[in-house]
Image (cartoon, rainbow, N blue to C red):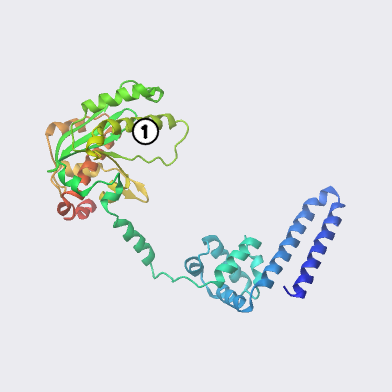
Amino acid sequence: MTIQKLVKRILNRMHISLFRQESSSYPHHRQGQDQFAYRCFVSKSKFQEITDDVKFEDEEKILNRLNNFTSEQFRHQMQVTFALSEELCKHREANGPYLTLLDLKKVKSVGPQRFIELCNRLKSEPLEAPSGNSAKKERIKQKSEIPAEKYFTPEPDSEFLKSISTVTSLAVCIDGVYYTHMSKDLKVHDWNHIALPGSDHHKLPAFQILQQALSIVDKLPKSSIYLNESSFHRKPNPANMPSLIFIAQLQMALQVLLNKDLKETQQHKVFAVKNTFIIKALDLRVGGERISGQHIIKLIEDEQYHDKVSMDPELWQHYHMLANQILRERYSNCLLMALVFWQKFVNKSLSNEGGTDMLNN
């Protein structure tokens, strides 16, 4: 440190000490103004100390970028936040070019700490600027190329997938367990639900939840594999937490009971499926929100879907006689989960023959 800088810092500290002594004797009604002035004085001295430590060539580089970069360049090439990049450009438009680094302290929301971070970012080498929407397209491409197995927990083994002949998709809810039993040839053998007795399920002790799980397992069709979609709750609140805990406990009990041969076979039969598995496969999203899949059920019923799904008329009649749209939505989710599973792992050639075009139409 040079003698000039050392003297400057000593003088700054002397000024601050004197300022504190004088402000302590001021009347009470002026304390707020004095504290504000003191903070401004400290910030100014802090800014001055920081700028004294910046090399001349770095200062030229920083000022050049401050005066020439656009808001997008600040964000993409220098990794500056959106709000700060906008403020930097607004200040430049309103007050002209940046002449010294101390001009940065006049920018809104730039304090000593952010001043240091900003200088370090602006003097570093810029990142390669993305051309158009190439970066966004690359991220979308990477997400779309995720293997189907990655949506399952645990991940199913390829050899095991070759050996299965039937799949049962489950939807565990507060009032019952909904399911679809479908074979490899896309034949729906059962499409129903098992109602849970009573209404205060969230108050049940663990042994009664296990009893309900045993009763459900006895009524479920025998299947090579069971799928259970992982539910997603964006904003759970204390009012519905007991119900969510009950559903989670029932799911755990079902998983243990349906996997009763795990110790001998070392092979899972129950798999948790991410909700994005169906959303991405069938494009069930508008503006970031999941939409209903009942329009696809209508295509299947009218035999206009690109994959032929066969089902007895009695099952369709039972579906249309359901009391409300909530029940139909649960039924449709189960059917679509089983269908997408076969499309992704067995009938891949069928699922790629214009499925997206059919949905768009």
Q: Is residue 108 left or right of residue 307?
A: right
In terms of image quadrants, where is residue 230?
Answer: top left
Q: As drawn, which residue projects farthest toward the front?
A: 264
Q: Residue at x 30, y 24 (%)?
A: 212
**Placement of the N terminus among the 4 image quadrants:** bottom right
Q: Is 80 situated above or below 242?
A: below
Residue 290 percent coordinates (x, y): 34, 46
Q: Residue at x 16, y 31 (%)?
A: 317
Q: Residue at x 35, y 22 (%)?
A: 207
Q: Amino acid at mark 1?
A: Ala
**Residue 108 found in image quarter:** bottom right
Residue lying at the far right in this picture: please name it. Answer: 25
For label 1, the SS is: helix
Tell whether 16 sits left or right of 58. Answer: right
**Within-10-Å neighbours for mark 1: few <14, some 14–19, many 20+:** some
Q: Quadrant of residue 210?
A: top left
Residue closer to the observer: 259 or 20: 259
Classify 231 as above or below 118.
above
Q: Position of residue 331 (x, y in %)?
A: 25, 35
Residue 251, given in percent of the width and then of the height, sits at 32, 33
Q: Position of residue 101 (x, y in %)?
A: 65, 72
| Residue position marked by numbered label 1 in the rendering | 248
Q: Is the residue 326 above or below the residue 285 in the image?
A: above
Check the image and report above or below for 331 versus 152. above
